Amino acid sequence: MTTKVKICGTTNFEDAHCATEAGADLLGFIFYPKSPRRIEVAAAKAIVSTIRQQTPPSQASPQMVGVFVNESLENVLNIMTEIGLDLAQLHGDESQSFLHEANAALSGRAYKALKANSVEVDAYISTGVPALLLDANHPNLYGGSGLRADESIASQVAQRCQLLLAGGLTPDNVAAAIRAVQPWGVDVASGVEAVPGRKDHQKVQHFVRAVRDINANS
């Protein structure tokens, strides 16, 4: 199985281009106003359009993911449509019914992000890809904390669905996390940054390479 790589918190074209060139499978754009990685809709639209235009026909363009935190369904749908995003990541306190409504409106292209604690995940597993994201259990932050997710919980969830693993991943520890959890994909933001909202391009390249290396050797 080839582990998918999502580079999240994209705020500028240079970082998006670097991640695409490195071989990232998904690019994440955060629309949460309180995030240091927040991007405006117009800026995200320009990046997504340019990346798609510049990607050679022989190369698959990354899937473009909108990250939303406690946003109204109307705004989620409007942003998804305006930018032409592929997937909606619901990273707040969205209810099961909200997830179901979003998936009904988006033809199964929404998935929920949950904190890795004892929460029951079955009701939040979507039928799309990925089916669920599991992040670190921080009491106050909706991701981007740099904390590691509980791998024992994550590995159990990964056996039941196509799991996107997030939380404190870096080029140095992602291989061990993949061995321990066996996720469908891995998600990184702060672990490949120079400063919040700006990627370290060497770290992005090393992160993707580390994932590809463990896939090749497993």
Image (tube, helix red, strand yellow):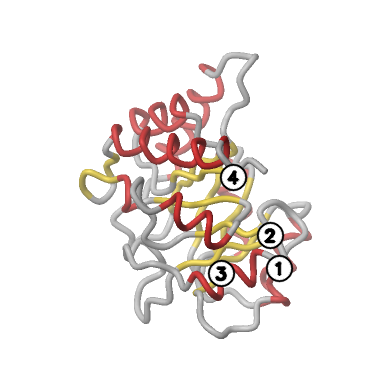
Mark with earlier residue (3, 2): 2
Q: Are marks 2 and 4 in contact (CB under 8 Å)?
A: no
Q: Which mark is nearer the camera, 3 or 2?
A: 3
**Mark closest to the chain's N terminus, 4 or 1:** 4
Discs 1, 2 touching: Cβ within 8 Å: yes
Point out the frontmost of discs 2 and 4.
4
Cα–Cα gap, marks 2 and 4: 14 Å
In this rendered view, identify the residue nearer to me: 140 or 162: 162
Lower position in the chain sequence, tag 1 or tag 2: 1
Q: Residue at x 37, y 51 (%)?
A: 189
Amino acid tagged 4: Thr
Secondary element under disc 4, as helix, strand or loop, is loop
Residue 99 picture quarter:
bottom right
Earlier-in-chain disc, 2 versus 4: 4
Dot 4: few (<14), some (14–19), or many (≥20) neighbours within 10 Å?
some
Q: Which residue is mark 1?
A: 125
Name which residue type carries label 3: Ala
Counting from the top left corner in percent of width and height, residue 80 is at: 60, 47
Cα–Cα gap, marks 3 and 2: 13 Å
Q: Residue at x 74, y 68 (%)?
A: 100
Q: Earlier in the sequence, mark 3 or mark 4?
A: 4
Q: Quadrant of the C terminus?
A: top right
Residue that carries the numbered disc 4 in the rendered image: 3
Q: Kindly identify which residue carries mark 3.
A: 154
